[in-house]
Amino acid sequence: MSNLGASLELPRIGYCDHFTLEKRYVCKDGTALNCQVDMSVLRSNEGNPIHFISQILDISERKKYESSVNEAQRMSE
């Protein structure tokens, strides 16, 4: 099971109501897309999950910047 698949089980079984994770997707053309996935669960009055609300944010540029900063720090040491 993928990280995302395993993470989706946590709110479904009542372990948490929200999570955020970073995931790397590979497009059909072979390019990589780094994403931040935010997911929340909306529950009924009885506590049963009735809706999952998710947002996927492209963080590829941020990851490139973080990588270049880390490389510059390594080179300055």
Image: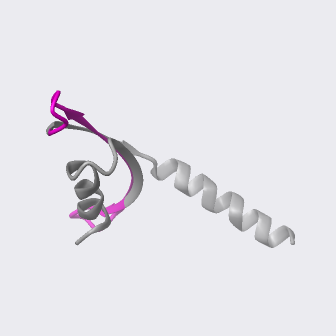
Q: How is the image coloured?
A: one colour
28 and 20: which is toward the camera: 20
- Whether residue 14 sits left or right of residue 46 in the image: it is right
Residue 77 found in image quarter: bottom right
Q: Quadrant of residue 57?
A: top left
In the displayed structure, 47 sits above or below 64; it is above
Instruction: State the extent of the magenta-drawn residues as a range.
Output: 24-48
Residue 4: percent from left, percent from top: 28, 60
Residue at (46% x, 48% y) in the render? 59
The image quarter in which residue 72 lies:
bottom right
Asked if residue 72 is among those painted magenta in the image, a careful observer would answer no
Q: Is residue 72 left or right of residue 12?
A: right
Residue at 34% from the left image edge and 47% from the top image edge: 16
Residue 53 rendering spot, x and y as whole percentages: 24, 36
From the viewer's perspective, is residue 55 above or below residue 24?
Answer: above
Q: Main secondary structure of the magenta part?
A: strand
Q: Write the residue at 26% across / 69% down.
A: 2
Query: As drawn, which residue projects farthest toward the right?
Result: 77
Relative to 39, residue 27 above or below: below
Q: Which residue corresponds to the image point at 70% horizontal and 67% vertical from the top-left?
A: 71
What is the x, y in percent for residue 61? 51, 49
Quadrant where the N terminus lies? bottom left
Image x and y of residue 17, in percent: 32, 41
Q: Relative to residue 44, is residue 1 depicted above or below?
A: below
